[in-house]
Image (cartoon, rainbow, N blue to C red):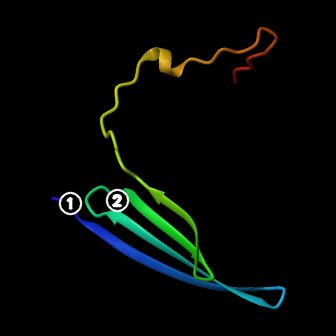
Amino acid sequence: TFFVTNITKKQETVRNNQSSITTNELWIDKETGLKLKSITNANNKQISEYIVTKVDFHPQFHEKDSTLDLPKDVKIIEN
């Protein structure tokens, strides 16, 4: 079962005597708390959109995924 909550937040700010209204709409999965979608509007114009289309909750990582190749002249200091 898939449950999503939609939250809209409206914020008005004044800068240099000009008013600006920003709204953020969030779609959050109630079961996982994961943000699935967000839309940001400024003065009734959409300025960003974020959509999650696929999530792997059990990814497989290998040791080679966590390597860091440093230049030879780098000093490593341990506390």
Residue 68 as seen in the image, left or right of residue 65: right
Q: Is 34 in front, or is 45?
A: 45
**Residue occupying the point 45% across, 78% down:** 8
Image location (x, y in percent) of residue 38 = 46, 65
Residue that sits furthest to the left in the current view: 1
Image location (x, y in percent) of residue 40 = 55, 70
Image location (x, y in percent) of residue 69 = 66, 14
Residue at which label 2 appears: 33
Residue that sits furthest to the top in the current view: 72
Residue at which label 1 appears: 2
Q: Residues within 10 Å of mark 1 (few under 14, many from 20)?
A: few
Quarter of the image with the N terminus is bottom left
**Residue occupying the point 34% across, 26% down:** 60
Residue 50 as seen in the image, left or right of residue 29: right
Q: What element does badge 2 sit on?
A: loop
Which amino acid type is marked by label 1? Phe
**Residue occupying the point 40% across, 59% down:** 35
Residue 57 vertical placement versus 43 (above, below): above
Residue 4 as seen in the image, left or right of residue 76: left
Image location (x, y in percent) of residue 55 = 34, 44
Residue 67 vertical placement versus 16 (above, below): above
Quarter of the image with the C terminus is top right
Which amino acid type is marked by label 2? Gly
Residue 14 vertical placement versus 53 (above, below): below
Q: Is 45 in front, or is 73?
A: 45
